[in-house]
Image (spheres, rainbow, N blue to C red):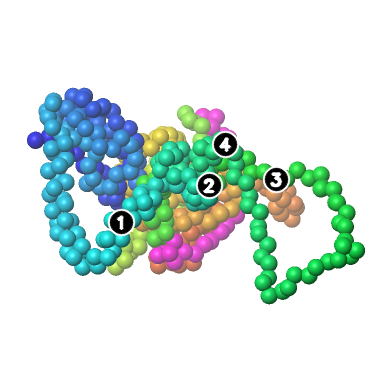
């Protein structure tokens, strides 16, 4: 019998996958291990290879979200009845469900079943997808919604679909009726006492007419990545007691060093490279910052692996620069650029986003002077880096133009105390204000 292919679990935190593209179409021959589809997990877009040889008989889901173990395709011999394979699985899975449904039906009053069966028009209306405004207009002018083809999301009927049926004319606004009190007798006015109202010219104001159509919002499904970001950062923010330490750094010497290094370096170094290297060197001196809360114990990591937050279209990915403390600035630069490029294309592998012991989030390139970041588990700290700003500073009793950068360290108070975080920032500041230390 044909083999039913289900959505695989491609990461330890994955609960559903999003089918991005099929590399085979129905009727194509495929070999075991050959690329079948691209699936977006909660961490990256990954290749899904065929688990067997055969012919792709049926694609159950062309694209979109699919829960783990739900059916996505059927592979078998050419001409084989793939529907029989689906039916056999459906019968097996429905066996237990039908028993529960029968028991529930017996406990339900018969009058409910009678009402539902008699009121066929009500059940039909429940199946029609339409916006509240479309339903209201259709009811007012006596239009059957079942005769209208919707142009909204998933065939949903919206206001412009109803208006199109009546000739494209917008519905007039009903004139409110004035209630007349029955208790007060009508007062007659004698002809001689009639008051003639002087007509008042209408103000020369163009009345507002709403020319738009449809709903004034758009619902966008949440991607797998955004779901995981929401869950993990929610757990971090409300599970780990955060506190924040901010320090300002004079970047004048770092600017000069970068300029000198770029004259001889094989790649163009960035300030972010200096920040990553300075953080890694400082973490060696302050192991408490390079640690993790593990519920029943604290893990002091012997490796210095820096996670670098990268903004992508759907959210945020954090590729990890491993052994950052023993890599050169050029090596860090090449590695970060290469991984950031693949992160934006969602081509990072899960292992490239694991093992971080400390994270850096840099928004300086967007003109942000200062911000706080949420800790990226399992780290105990994350460093939020602002931009380098020209501002007046006092040096040797004189006011001069300084090149200042603010950084904020977010700390998990279960692991890191205020003094420990402050000492780390002091070391970090000393390194960047005298950056020759990065070269020794």
Vertical position of residue 301 compared to residue 48: above or below: below
Image quadrant containing the N terminus: top left
Spatial CA distance of label 1 from label 4 is 36 Å
Which residue occupies 14% across, 45% down?
Answer: 89
Spatial CA distance of label 2 from label 3 is 23 Å
User: Disc 3 on helix, strand or loop?
Assistant: loop
Vertical position of residue 82 compared to residue 197: above or below: above
Dot 2: within a 10 Å radius of its alpha carbon, few (fewer than 14), some, or many (20 or more) residues?
A: few
User: Disc 2 on helix, strand or loop?
Assistant: helix
Q: Which numbered disc, 1 or 4, marks the residue that appears first in the sequence?
A: 1
Look at mark 1 in the image and give the residue it sits on: 118
Residue 332 can be seen in this image: no
Q: Which numbered disc, 2 or 3, marks the residue that appears first in the sequence?
A: 2
Dot 4: within a 10 Å radius of its alpha carbon, few (fewer than 14), some, or many (20 or more) residues?
A: few
Spatial CA distance of label 4 from label 3 is 18 Å
Q: Position of residue 260 (x, y in %)?
A: 56, 34
Q: Position of residue 122 (x, y in %)?
A: 37, 54
Q: Position of residue 323 (x, y in %)?
A: 36, 45
Q: Nearer the viewer, residue 430 or 69?
A: 69
Q: Nearer the viewer, residue 389 or 112?
A: 112
């Amino acid at each position: 019998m044909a083999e039913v292919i289900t959505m695989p679990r491609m990461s330890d935190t994955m609960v559903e996958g999003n089918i991005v593209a099929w590399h085979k179409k129905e009727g194509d021959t495929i070999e075991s291990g050959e690329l079948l589809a691209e699936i977006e997990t909660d961490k990256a877009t990954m290749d899904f290879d065929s688990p067997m040889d055969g012919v792709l008989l049926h694609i159950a889901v062309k694209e979109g979200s699919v829960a783990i173990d739900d059916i996505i395709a059927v592979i078998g011999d050419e001409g084989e009845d793939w529907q029989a394979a689906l039916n056999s699985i459906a019968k097996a899975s429905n066996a237990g469900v039908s028993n529960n449904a029968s028991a529930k039906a017996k406990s339900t009053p018969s009058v409910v079943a009678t009402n539902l069966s008699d009121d066929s028009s009500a059940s039909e209306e429940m199946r029609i997808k339409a916006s509240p405004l479309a339903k209201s207009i259709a009811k007012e002018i006596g239009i059957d919604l079942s005769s209208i083809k919707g142009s909204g999301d998933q065939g949903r009927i919206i206001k412009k679909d109803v208006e199109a049926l009546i000739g494209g004319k917008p519905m007039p606004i009903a004139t409110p009726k004035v209630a007349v009190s029955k208790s007060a007798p009508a007062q007659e006015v004698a002809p001689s006492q009639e008051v003639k109202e002087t007509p008042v010219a209408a103000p020369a104001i163009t009345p507002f007419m709403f020319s738009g159509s449809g709903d004034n919002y758009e619902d966008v499904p949440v991607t797998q990545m955004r779901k995981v970001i929401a869950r993990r950062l929610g757990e971090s923010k409300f599970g780990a007691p955060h506190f924040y330490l901010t320090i300002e750094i004079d970047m004048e010497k770092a600017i000069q060093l970068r300029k000198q290094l770029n004259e001889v370096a094989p790649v163009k170094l960035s300030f972010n490279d200096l920040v990553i290297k300075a953080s890694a060197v400082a973490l060696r001196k302050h192991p408490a910052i390079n640690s993790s809360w593990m519920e029943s114990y604290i893990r002091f990591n012997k490796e210095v692996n820096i996670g670098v937050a990268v903004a992508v279209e759907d959210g945020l990915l954090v590729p990890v620069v491993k052994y950052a403390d023993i890599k050169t600035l050029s090596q860090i630069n090449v590695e970060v650029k290469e991984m950031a490029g693949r992160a934006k294309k969602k081509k990072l592998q899960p292992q490239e986003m694991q093992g971080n012991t400390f994270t850096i989030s840099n928004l300086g390139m967007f003109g942000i002077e200062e911000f706080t970041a949420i800790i990226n588990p399992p780290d105990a700290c994350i460093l939020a880096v602002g931009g380098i700003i020209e501002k007046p500073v006092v040096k040797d009793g004189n006011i001069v133009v300084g090149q200042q950068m603010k950084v904020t360290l977010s700390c998990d108070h279960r692991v890191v105390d205020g003094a420990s975080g402050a000492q780390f920032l002091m070391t970090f500041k000393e390194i960047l204000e005298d950056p020759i230390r990065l070269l020794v």
